[in-house]
Image (spheres, helix red, strand yellow):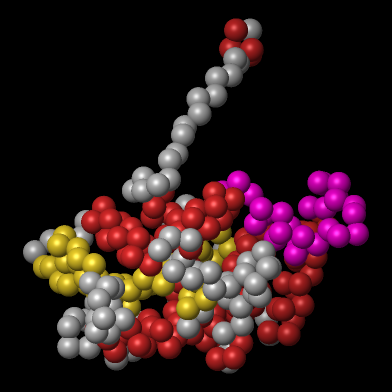
């Protein structure tokens, strides 16, 4: 939790999740080996980065104890209470954060009458991960991962068209250097070609894949998009925005599900009307 607080203050008091994760990794001085750690197959979060997962829960814990707040747009901000932890030395700050979380969790369990031996923050993680929102994504990802490679490429082509790309073409031929397709994206008066690559996997995509894709784009264009049904390791995310190299935008499993839902591609959303009678009004 402490590196997250230091990072968000370093970023000016507020930050989007991606930049907060990136800065927290730098502040915590994590090694390449640590960044490559993912949950094993069969686990609830198989293929996901352990570092990114833990950073997510660090933010959540900080929000629960009042040190951070977040908006619907995914922007996190430090509170005055959060800044008090930064006004003391790190050992004392970490001890204070741990104490604040323990007190919050004890109160939470008491109010919810959670008295079983298995009650813990990790147990809450598992309960939260099994919510309805994640169940449809899990089912959708299972369908996507069982598609044929060319079908998934065509789905990506359709998604890019829905998102405003023009002249989207699937290449997918031998000798394409790992590039699956290209489309033209226009912003106001400027348009530029964007090359994309599809990775239909259940695990994680490493930094090497990002470097190889960037190499395949060399001489063709400077804008790339990597789409996967898996996740990107922390080092892959860092490689995608490395200084001095053409940026590569990343779309991983969670983002892909949300995009398919947004554009209504194979995902339907029903709004249920709930009617209640307000007795006090008639009183």
Residue visible at 68% across and 68% down?
Answer: 42
Residue 138 screen position, x and y as percent? 56, 55
Q: Looking at the rendering, which quadrant does residue 3 occupy?
A: bottom right
Q: Is residue 45 visible?
A: yes
So how many labels did they put on this image?
Answer: 0
Q: Where on the picture, by quarter, is residue 44? A: bottom right
Q: What span is in magenta?
A: 108-133
Estimate the x, y position of residue 218 in percent, counting from the top left. 22, 88
109 within the magenta span: yes
Q: Main secondary structure of the magenta part?
A: helix
Rendered position, 244 above or below 225:
below
Q: Position of residue 188 (x, y in %)?
A: 13, 61
Q: Where does the N terminus fall, quadrant-wise?
A: bottom right
Q: Is residue 217 magenta?
A: no
Would residue 250 be found to the left or right of residue 71 on screen? left
Is residue 241 toward the left or the right of residue 21 in the image?
left
Residue 22 lies, with reference to residue 251, above or below; the image says: below
Could you say which is closer to the camera, residue 159 or residue 61?
A: 159
Residue 67, can we see it?
no
**Residue at 40 percent of width and 63 percent of height:** 148
Quadrant of image for the C terminus: top right
Picture coordinates of residue 246, whole percent (x, y): 27, 84
| For residue 122, side relative to residue 57 (left or right) | right
Residue 252: quadrant of the picture: bottom left
| Front in this rendered view, residue 231 or 12 | 231
Q: Is residue 280 above or below residue 175?
A: above
Q: Residue at x 63, y 62 (%)?
A: 60
Which residue occupies 61% across, 82% down? 37
């Amino acid at each position: 939790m402490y590196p997250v607080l230091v990072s968000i203050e370093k970023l000016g008091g507020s930050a989007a999740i991606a930049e907060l994760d990136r800065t927290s990794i730098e502040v915590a001085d994590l090694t390449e080996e640590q960044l490559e750690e993912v949950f094993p197959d069969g686990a609830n979060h198989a293929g996901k980065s352990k570092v990114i997962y833990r950073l997510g829960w660090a933010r959540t814990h900080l929000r629960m104890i009042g040190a951070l707040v977040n908006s619907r747009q995914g922007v996190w901000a430090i509170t005055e209470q959060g800044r008090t932890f930064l006004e003391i030395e790190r050992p004392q700050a970490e001890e204070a954060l741990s104490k604040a979380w323990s007190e919050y969790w004890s109160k939470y369990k008491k109010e919810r009458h959670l008295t079983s031996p298995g009650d813990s923050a990790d147990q809450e993680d598992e309960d939260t991960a099994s919510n309805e929102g994640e169940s449809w994504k899990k089912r959708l990802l299972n369908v996507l991962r069982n598609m044929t490679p060319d079908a998934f490429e065509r789905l990506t082509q359709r998604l890019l068209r829905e998102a405003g790309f023009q002249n989207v073409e699937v290449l997918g031929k031998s000798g394409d250097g790992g590039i699956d397709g290209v489309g033209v994206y226009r912003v106001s008066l400027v348009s530029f070609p964007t090359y994309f690559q599809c990775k239909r996997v259940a695990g994680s995509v490493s930094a090497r894949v990002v470097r190889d894709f960037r190499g395949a784009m060399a001489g063709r264009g400077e804008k790339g998009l990597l789409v996967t049904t898996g996740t990107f390791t922390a080092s892959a995310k860092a490689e995608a925005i490395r200084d001095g190299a053409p940026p590569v935008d990343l779309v991983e499993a969670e983002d892909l599900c949300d995009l398919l839902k947004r554009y209504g591609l194979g995902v339907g959303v029903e709004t249920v009307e709930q009617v209640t009678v307000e007795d006090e009004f008639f009183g």
